[in-house]
Image (spheres, rainbow, N blue to C red):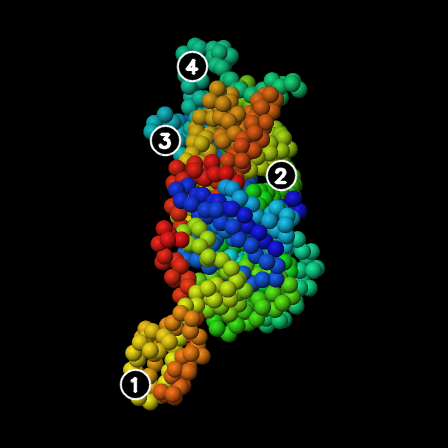
Amino acid sequence: MNKVLLIIQREYMVRVKKKSFILMIFLVPALIVAMFGVIYLITTYSNDMNKTRTVWVMDESGVFTGKFQNKSKLAFQTVTKSLVDEKSDLRKNEDDFLLVIPTDYSKTDAVQIFSKKEANFTIAGEIEDQMNTIATGNKLVTAGIDTLKLHAIKSNISIVAKQITDKGEQDSSIGAAYGAGIAGAILVYLALFIYGAQVMRGVLEEKTSRIIEVIVSSVKPFQLMLGKIIGVGLVGLTQFILWIVLSSGVTYVAGNMLMKDKILPAKTAQMKAHQPTKIQTSPGISSAPQSPAINAYNSFKTVNFPYILGCFLFYFLSGFFLYAALFAAVGSAVDSETETQQFMFPITLPLLFTYIISFSFLINNPDSTLAIWLSEIPFTAPVAMMVRIPFGVPGWQLALSMFMMVIGFLFTTWVAARIYRVGILMYGKKASYKELAKWFFYKE
Amino acid sequence: MLSIRNIVKQYAGHTALSDVSLDVESGQIFGLLGPNGAGKTSLIRIINQITAPDSGEVYFDGVKLNQSHIDRIGYLPEERGLYKKMEIGEQMIYLARLKGLSRDEAIKRLKYWFEKLEMQSWWNKKIEELSKGMQQKAQFVATILHEPDLIILDEPFSGFDPVNAEIIKDEILELNRKGATILFSTHRMESVEELCNSIALLNKSKKILDGKVRDIKNSYRNATYLIEYAGEKLFFDESQPFTLIEEKQTDDANIIKIKLADGASSNDILQYLIPKTSINMLQEVIPTMNEIFIEKVNQKPALS
């Protein structure tokens, strides 16, 4: 056992000391910082867009005066000065618009809007919509139709997703669960491949450099395989834990800076700013719209991160042990990395299959029979379960799946060890499946 | 030291060792010889407990081979190799610790050996930065660092230049003097005659010859002599105490190869020749290990 510890230590230290490992440790938090940078830029830019812009309405027809509704980004004011004066004013207030409505407004291109900055589609569209509504309303009134009744008839439905859990109804955000599910699946999939392949390459390195013969004269092949798998697994674990710690640190700091200073005050300031200018609030129009960043931030909070992270670490480790053993067997069976392909493909097929359907099928049907089965079968469970977990998985299913994972990796380790012990000492023999089966049945 | 009893090892399709028994006495330098594919490596792997025999036993100092013996054996495989990307010092420590040495003890001994073999400056170098000969030297150190009682060397001199081969040979002899038993496998017969006390010859999975080198060579003496004499070429009839096998003439001498008649001795040859000519040289032709090796291997199995 002491020797296994030595092997674990070596496998771990050799990899952790590598420059690429250290680089990767800091790369991910750096990416997160960059992501926050982008969010910061977007919010600053959208704050600029969010500025309330005044539209000076010069209504020659008299149909529209006082009927425009103020929106979060638009305030309507009736002009007091002449067209020429207003136009010169416009040069000074570059965020303002001047809307000129002639008496024959219904003619094509009759209504004009002036501004220093170009009016964007949203603003022009908003004004157009409002004018159409007002004009239609007017026509309805002229036609003798009660507009109040009409408003009452119009429906305005918005859905709030509530999930029934043991703790009662809970705000759930489908979007966040989606995100967490997909992110978990991708991470587990990549981690299994990256670290599984590291085990395989490690075995292959020992075999091709022939050091294997020296090592197995000191330790049993199984001890070496076990030490290598655990060592690489710990490297993966270290990497993920450091990522989680560093990333949450970065997220916490950056989040505090961004969310508190930029987005939240901007939102409240906006609300305060146009509260007094609101002329009328009509039913159906919801309160101040939230910026998408706030939405994301809030729905982010509905995800139970410690639970998901805990599951992630379990499925990463158990899945890793399961696949690493098989990868080790593959590494032992061949003489060069190019030969690994024929064995790698069938081994990774279940994982690949689950990975592919996780984005289309599983994520949309996390409680379907297929999803449940895939999350119970050890070969596919790491990915399938990570997709399902954010949507909530019954306790017994999770427990069974975890139990199956343990059984699964014990089984693959046993099978792999039998192939490994023979394979590592076979040089220059082209391994086929038949050959592998033979090795499996070799006596000690 | 090592007693190998009726070892049988079969791989799918072929037999690597069939009923091989041999004894290696303590303090010997034992040569395990045989052509490629004879089963030498299979036997060495069994002694190292890398693989287990299908039947038969190996006794180490009278005790059936078990895990506790691993630390008492040092093994230098024919196919050498170390971790390429690992620094040599750390790697040596690692290999020594796998053999049960403590870290401090390993460092102490490594310092001694690195100094002795003039490798001090290599400590922090990675294996891939060393020449092949240097790697071999490092691996030799790794093999013997834990002061094993039994040192198994598979083709120890391959890959060494003559100077380093000599250094390694001297180290092997010194280790042997200090009490280590050495089992080495080779095809290089000259090193066998130089180093080995005893040998075993394997061919096609079977042991076909074993014993002390001197005894084997004696048993292959066949009363053949080489004689060089000066002067006129002699003509032999049936009266001389030998039969002529070969005759050769050089510029100033004649060389003959003869086989002694039954019951005659080398003195009889001299007595017969001295009156007739002046003798430059008389030498008994003892077959080299190489000749014995080739002769034994080429014998039809049916004959043995």
Q: Position of residue A1 (x, y in %)?
A: 65, 44
Chain letter of mark 1 equals B
Q: Which residue is mark 4?
A: A140
Q: Which mark is residue A110?
A: 3
Q: Identify the residue shown where x is 38% and y is 72%.
A: B261
In this rendered view, identify the residue nearer to me: A257 or A319.
A319
> Given the image, on which type of amino acid does mark 1 rest?
Lys
Say yes or no: labels 2 and 1 on the same chain: no
Q: Secondary structure at mark 1?
A: loop
Q: Which residue is mark 2?
A: A259
Q: Secondary structure at mark 3?
A: loop
Q: Is residue A308 above or below residue B99?
A: above
Comparing labels 1 and 3, the label whose residue is closer to the camera: 1
Q: Are marks 1 and 4 in contact (CB under 8 Å)?
A: no
Q: CA distance from mark 1 to mark 3?
A: 138 Å
Q: Is residue A134 above or below residue A218?
A: above
Comparing labels 1 and 4, the label whose residue is closer to the camera: 1
Q: Which residue is mark 1?
A: B233
> Given the image, on which type of amino acid does mark 3 rest?
Ala
In this rendered view, identify the residue nearer to me: B135 or A365.
B135
Is residue A346 something that shows in the picture?
Answer: yes
The crowding category of the residue bearing disc 2, from other C-alpha atoms within 10 Å (few below 14, some 14 to 19, many at least 20), is some
